[in-house]
Structure formats: C-alpha cells, structure tokens
Amino acid sequence: MLSRLACSFHGCPETFKSQRGRTKHIHTYHSSVDAIPNPTAADSNPHSDSDPQEFNFNSNHDLINDNYFNNPNSQPEGHSNGRQSQYIPHPHLRGDPCDLKGNPLPPNAPKPARYVGPQDSWAPFGDQAEYLLADFLFCKEEMSAPNIDFLMELWAFKAAKYEEDSPFKSHRDVYATIDVIRAGDVPWQCFSVAPQHNLDSDVPWWQQTEYQVWYQDPDAVIQAMLANPDFAGQFDYSPYVHYDQSGKHRWKDFMSGNYAWRKSDTIYENDPSTEGSMYVGIILGSDKTTVSVATGHVEYHPLYLSIGNPHNCVRRAHHNAVTPIGFLAIPKADRKYNNDVQFRTFKRQLYHSSLAAIFKSLQGPMTKPIVCRCPDGHFRRVIYNLAAFIADYPEQVMLSGIVQNWCAKCTVLPEDLDGSTAECQSQDYTDVLVETFNLDVLWDQYGIDDDIVPFTNDFPRADIHEMLLPDLLHQVIKGCFKDHLVTWMGECLKEVHGEARANDIIDDIDHRIAATPSFPGLCRFPEGRCFKQWTGDDSKALMKVYIPAIVEYVSPQLVECLSAFLNFCYLVRRSELGEDSLAKIKQALQHFHEAREIFCDSGVRPNDFALPCQHSMVHYIHLIQEFGAPNGLCSSITESRHITAVKKSWYAADNQRLDKLAAAHVDFVARGLLPASHAPPPRCSVDVTMGEGIKNDAPDIERVQGSVILARTPQRGYPRTLETLAVHLQQPNLPLLARDDVSGTHGMHREVIRCTPLWCRKHARYDCVFVVEDQEKAGMRGMIIRRVKLLFSFVFHSVTYSCALIDRFSRMGRGPDSLTGMWKVKPEVSGQRGTRVQSVKHVDTILRSAHLIPVFGSGPLPDGFHFTYSLDVFNSYYVNKFADHHSHEIVF
C-alpha cells in the first residue's frame, strides 16, 4: 500500500497522494488567520494565552535531511504505476539450498546451525573488552609494538593495586591472541619461481634470480566470503534479468549482467547435473603500486580477489568483499634493459605463470560443483568461473598479450582508435592468427605478442579479452579528463593568446576554482589546481567545479566538449542504469566526439584522437550490459585497498591478522555479541514476494518515508519570539513570512545543511537548497533554489513547526544554459539598494542541498577574493549538476 502525505495542521485527519493535493487542501481549508498563529496579532488570537508559542533558533546551524529520494523529480527511469518491475532468475543455476552432501532441500527447510559451542563465547579473547582493545590497537590505532608494550606496562602497574591483571602482557601477546582466531584463517603461502638449469654464464642476472610469490589459497578465500553472514540481504544467489515498470531492461549489480547469465547457460548446457547450483563469478584485480616506507622495496604488485554475488555497494564499502590474495614478483634490471624485448617477455611470462599457479586450486570447482555455506546460513552447490579482471591499461596490455596502443577489447587498428569499433577480441581469434602468421605479421598488423600465453588458457570458459572491465578511474577520470582535456585546454590557451597571457588566464581560472562556495562533501582547492601530483580524488573533485571556471576564457565549443564529457562520466558512474541511461550515454559520447574537434582545429591535436583511454569509452555501453554498473567494478576499489593491504601493512602476517579481526567482528555480530555496525541499507522501495521467478515491487516513489529535522540543541543568544527575532535579524517581515509557510514531505539520504554566522570559528556559511515547488514537473522545472539564512522552530497547539528563513533565487530562462548544460539562477532583489527578497518555508519542502557556482563573467577576480563572499556579490549563478551524482540525476 502506498504511503500518503498527511496534512500538517494539528487535528486534521486528511491525507493526500501528492504534494499538490495537500497544498490545495491547505489553501482551501487552513488559510484563515487562526490556522497558523499570527504573532503580530496576539490579542486577536484566541489561543495566544492558553497555548503560548515557543521559538527555538537552531543551535548547531544544521538541518539534518534524513530521507532518500521521494520525489518525482528523481524517479527511476520508466517509472509507471501501471505495472510492476520484474526480477527473473536464471532457470537452471538458481542457487537452490542443499544439505552438506549436496542433496536438495525441501521448501522452507530450516537452516543448519552455523556455530558449535557456547553462543556467548568471546574466544580466543577473554571478554568483549579484550577483543575491542586488540581491535583498537591493531586496526584502528595501528599502534607500534614498543608503544603497545609501554601501554601494557602502565596498565599492569595500575591493575596491580587492585590485584588484577592487564588484558595483554605485551605486543607479542596481542599478536598471538589474534593469530588464534579461527574465523578468516586463510594462511599465506609462498612459492618460488626458480631459474632454468644449465644457463650460460653471460645470461643477465635477472634471468638467474629466484623470485618469490606470496599468496593465499583462492578457494579458501572464496569459501570464507561465501560464508560471511555480513553479506546476508545484499547477495545474489542467481543471475537475473531486471525489467522496470515500463518493461525496459536495467543493469545494476554484477549478477544482473548478460555475462553471468550467458556463462550460466554454458555451464548447464555442458553439464546438466549442475541444475540448481549457484554461479560464483570470480573477480580479480591487480595494480602495481609504490610504497616509500618499510623494507626498501618501493614497488609492490598486489593481487586482489572478489566475487560477483555481493552487491556493488558491499564491494565499494569493502566489508571483506575485496581482499588481497597475493603479491606478485617484480623483476628488476639495469636501465639498459628498459626497452629490451627479452626482458619484457620474461616479465610477462613470469606474471602469467604466477597467476596460473596461484589459481590452480580453482580448476576443480570450475568443472564440478562443491558444497559451500552461504551468507543466509544455507548450504549450496557452487560452481566457480573466472569472470572479470579489474586493471588499468598497462595491466590490460600485459594480461591480454597485445601490443601497446592496441585495444584489448576489439580488433580496431591503432590509427582508428579515435571513435571506431571493430569485432570483439577473443582468445580463439588470437589462436587462429598465431597458427597462421609469423611473429612480425602478428606484431605489426594484428597487435599480438605471440610470446605470451595468457594464464586464462589453463581454466575453462575463461577468455581474458572478455573478462577485462571498464576502468573509470584510470581511463575516464585520470586519463581523459586530467591527462587529456585539462592539459589540452592549457595548450589551447597558449595557441590563442601566447604563453604569457595564457598563464595569466590559467592563474585566474585557479582563482575562480578557489572561489567556489562550500558544499557538503566537496573538496576545496584554496590554490586552484596548482598541485604537482594529482590523485584520483583530486581529479574527481576538480571535475565538479571546472566548467564554470573556464567559461568566457575558452571557446564555446571547448566548454561544450567538457560538458559532454562530464555528462558521459556522471552517467556511467551511476549505481543503476537502464535502457534510457544507455541512450543518454550514447548521445553524450557522440556529442563529445563532435565537440572535441576543437582541439584539432586549434592545432593541439593536429592529427587524430587515437588514444586508448578515449577509445575505451566506446565500449562502456556493451560492458554495462555485460557486467552491470561500472562503479561497482572499478580500479578505485582495488586502489583504495592498497592503503590497508600494502601502504599500511606490507607483511603477509599483518594482512592475515586484519582479515581475522574483521572475520571475528562479523562472527560476534552474527551471534548478537556486538551491535551490527554495517547493517544492510533498507530496501524500502521493494516489497519482495517470490513466485514463479518474479520479484515484484510497488512503485518506488510513494513508499519511501523519512524526516527533515533541525539539530537538537538550541542556539544561545537568540530571541525566543518572532517579533524580537525579526528585529535581531533586521527582517521586519519575518512574522508575516512565517504565516505563509506551507509544508511538504520530500527528501533523500542523510545530509547536513549548514546555516551559521561563524563556521569553524572563521566565517559565515549559509548553504543553498532545492525546494520542491511543483511535484508534477520534472527536474529543475519543478524546483526552485533558495539559500538558508536562518533555521528556527515554534510550537503551537503542541505541534512543533520547523522553518527556514531563506533568500530567494529565480530561474533564468526556460531550460539549461546551451553552452554548459547547467541551469542559471539569479537572486531576487527589491528596491534600489538591491535588498535580497526573503521568505519562510517549512523545512519539509527542502529536497536537499544545492551547489551554486558564480557566473564569473569575462574579467578576473579581485586580488584576495575569498570564497565566502561568492554567494553574496554575483548577479547570477550556475546550478552545479556536477556537485555529486545525486545532483546530476535530479538537475535536468
């Protein structure tokens, strides 16, 4: 049953389907003077004495918005109340529960007991305090061994007065206790790659060296992941196809992709005895990284493993869904071997032979199902498949055995990488070419290095070309945006204006970036983009504020190019995509390809755009259909794991202890000994009823509920009546504006909207917000921009009304700016002095934070201009739809 909006007036029982219906009701039946108290006419109000109004200025200057999108402006693609969406599971690899011997269970069979022994045991720790202390010292504080020893000595000295013992004697006692944990106990192993026998004495030393490879048994790691109760409720037991309410295909998590469904078909067709088994797609990732501390070996090559069954949100949050399982050897050589063909071939062969050796234990479960426990507590017959590999372009070259500057996904020639596509690369295609042509032809005409045999050749159904995933971080964000577009823009300025003037312009662009107003979660650049080393986070943050800073300094076509690229980037980064999204992605990519010709015309790219990073964008639509949303399978996930796996913990024992403590935490939560700190997010848009392979849900929009509240503690020093508050704020119309307030229920995820004259004890901060004006109009046509200047509440008839005093902005034009793709707004002013027009709104009408960036115009900013003035002094502003992915979805 759909939730309805209640009338906000005390004692009124009416409910409504939409905000428009409630607004009409309020204007019709609650517009009299005594409906909302008029503080300026207390004598005429019969309730003024018996029910005094109590006013509260909000203390922490925070408005807490604790909902998820519940607004037609943000409704899913193809939303239609006339039909239900469908989740159709695979007909054969369904993930049916079974017993320990693999025999199918009857429907509604009880789950087997997960734990043996006392349910309240903290073993191997003595009690909760010991576990929390060990977790604090090793995981959270990462305390050094000498400091742990000193702390335990102090503790023992204090405890001796009460004839007690300290929890641990020393750091060795802490480590030994963690090592006894059985959960997550997958030991690290090592194998050596020895040099060939009977090598000549003049063979390079790197060929005579013995290399060590550390790894964990991937089969044991996968079984530990499958048994993790932390994944319950966020785990797919079967590939599925999702159709929305309008019958259009949608893709989200890995198991919604065509790849998992197609491989499940192949598994069943080759072996019908796999009927009812659970498909487990293995996701790998590797990325060489540098560490400046520890053993002196500054380079590490970690190997990561995940599985496709946990939802993307779990993988992004890690939750033990992505784990390091190996550290590959990195051959070193003198500089004279940097371009040596033999050395390059040796490195590739060592790389692939190491991967094949690490994953050898998976060969059996790839052909015959094995019985494993799953997050819901049931056992299932499980069959593995090498499904995907997360890698940047250099790693893709090494994995697929292609020549540099060729595409690992299709057979297009290097000179045609500027937007063309060709037939898909495949291992079968490569094998035929290798049997037909010699090495020179393969290298020059087909981009194949026949000295390399990919490790996937040792495993059934695995094709490395098919497995390679889109890489948002390195291909799109770092590659296309940072390395190409931002660099080319600077070169364009130099071509047009000369180097001296171009440097002045770039300096002012940096000043504009530094003048960008604050926004929740937005990284600020106090010096613009004047930093030597860009991280992925730097690139992501700069993308959000870059376009308004360059307008008027670069040609309109260049601005259009950046806008089209950012649209593509934000679309492919969405957590769920449908057929309509794919059409928008195609349109944005086509627009980008057309607009980027400005770089050819200006002489910056006189020849072409045959660049692997930009070419990769043409494959994104197909890869979304194959593997689901790219943001759940991006190299940013493995790169962020570098911090714990390598840069903070470079020993195998440390990684194993981290895994054990994390597994122990999950174990204690599952037994109710600890509170669940990572509970699955509520899926309140879905009513799940399983039957005939279809999962039905009610329409998303009306079911989600939430609240918008002021911060709890009142601010000191503010008046407690509207009349005196009006005088204090120099806003004489405040009592009248409060009378005109009309409330409504909208919202999103939790965020804080700040309104304070002194933020961080430095300067004022008054955030901007989206206010829903008409729910029946989509995007910005149904919303208005307001700036919150005061948050306050009052009590009337025992009902608290939470309100906001706001500066008003009006839309400029009937649609987005044709150049930037962003809406423009301007402050509403009155009188010759240009006083900002204000009004009062109930906080329930606020949808979420909005980010405005000034329309800077053609001139430079004054020296020393501070970003806190930006929302006060400009005549017009862009509504920044690139502030975050929520803004991009609702601002159109």
Image (cartoon, rainbow, N blue to C red):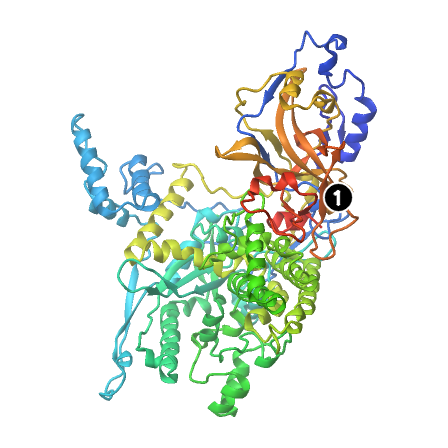
Classed neighbour count for the residue bearing mark 1: other residues with Cα under 10 Å, few (<14), some (14–19), many (≥20)? many
The residue depicted at 55 percent of the width and 82 percent of the height is: 429
184 or 413: which is nearer to us?
413
565 or 579: which is nearer to us?
565
In the figure, is residue 404 to the left or right of 850?
Answer: left
Quadrant of the rendered image containing residue 638: bottom left
In the figure, is residue 313 to the left or right of 25?
Answer: left
Instruction: Provide residue 427's location: percent of width, then percent of height.
Output: 52, 79
In the figure, is residue 834 to the left or right of 155?
Answer: right
SS state under label 1: strand
Residue 386, above or below 746? below
What's under tag 1, amino acid-wise? Arg
Residue 846, above or below 460? above
Instruction: Provide residue 626's location: percent of width, then percent of height.
Output: 59, 65
Q: Is residue 768 visible?
A: yes
388 or 868: which is nearer to us?
868
471 or 613: which is nearer to us?
613
In the figure, is residue 476 to the left or right of 100?
Answer: right
Residue 727, above or below 762? above
Residue for badge 1: 811
Q: How many marks?
A: 1
Q: Which image quarter is the N terminus in?
A: top right
